Amino acid sequence: QLQLQESGPGLVKPSETLSLTCTVSGGSISSSRYYWGWIRQPPGKGLEWIASIYYTGSASYNPSLESRVTMSVDTSKNQFSLRLTSVTAADTAVYYCARFGRGKWSFDYWGQGTLVTVSS
Amino acid sequence: QSVLTQPPSVSAAPGQKVTISCSGSSSNIGNNYVSWYQQLPGTAPKLLIYENNQRPSGIPDRFSGSKSGTSATLGITGLQTGDEADYYCGTWDISLSAARVFGTGTKVTVL
């Protein structure tokens, strides 16, 4: 059974960089059938797609966040990561990592999510 | 601000049916597959419907999806208390560099 697990600091100071890693187990991140993505959800609000990446390292970003976001993939560790720079309180959210299937054209597996709070 | 619009809430008694609409445009729903996600309180979203009307294994046939033009609909029949959750539609938008987009979300309440 595929599992995704987010990890990273739960508290980040304003203007600093948020860094999260998603570890994939039970399947290979190097499959040509999938993309890997990050989605966030501010407290009490809806879902917002942040970015997605293919195992080759080719990434796409939400235009509203593109200037601050970088995704990377480490196939040797079966992990992918997110960096979000110059964070503000508006970046406080639960961050989910998820798999996007090229066949199902949807996010079919999700991590449990990790709350990141931006505060001094 | 999402490009996909859903009603904030819908409700019905146990055993009844609810439908949730997802309204978009030709740059998103009109030309791409729609998926639906269920988010139970305090948990991660779960895929309910993909490719407009397909159910992943393990999803009961009480859940159905359809698409017409620039709108999509999720239907839930035989409503159960365990269906109380937030529901989101999703697709991608070719006018936003193929960005993945989600709907505004709908809270389903079982009366």
Image: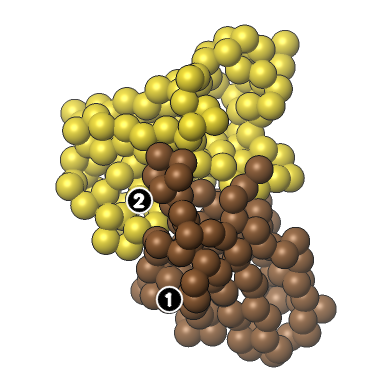
Chain colours: A yellow, B brown
Q: Image height check: is A54 above or below A86? A: below
* x, y percent for residue A8: 49, 24
Question: Which residue is drawn at the image coordinates 72% and 64% (left, top)?
Answer: B7
Q: Can residue A14 be seen by looking at this rendering?
A: yes
Q: Which mark is residue A59?
A: none
Same subunit, tags 2 and 1: no
Q: What amino acid type is highlighted by mark number 1?
A: Asn
Residue A58 at what x, y percent from top left?
26, 32
Quadrant location of residue B51?
bottom left
Question: Which image quarter is the N terminus of chain B in?
Answer: top right
Depth check, front residue: B8 or B84: B8
For the C terminus of chain B, give its image quadrant: bottom right
Q: x, y (%) of residue B41?
A: 67, 56
Residue placed under numbered mark 2 in the picture: A100
The answer to whether the residues at label 2 and label 1 have Cβ atoms under 8 Å apart is no
Chain letter for mark 2, please: A
Q: Quadrant location of residue A54?
A: top left
Q: CA distance from mark 2 to mark 1?
A: 17 Å
> Relative to A94, does residue B16 appear above or below in the rendering?
below
Place of residue A85 in the rendered image (x, y in percent of width and height, measured from the top left): 52, 15
**Residue B53 marker:** 1
Q: How many marks?
A: 2
Residue type of the residue flagged with mark 2: Phe
Q: Of residues A47 and A65, which is closer to you in this image?
A: A65
* B97 over B67 or under it: above or below: above
- Left/right placement of residue B89 relative to residue B97 reads right
> In the displayed structure, does residue B43 sit left or right of residue B53?
right
Viewer can see residue B58 = no
Q: Is residue A97 left or right of residue A31?
A: right
Say which element carries label 1. Answer: loop
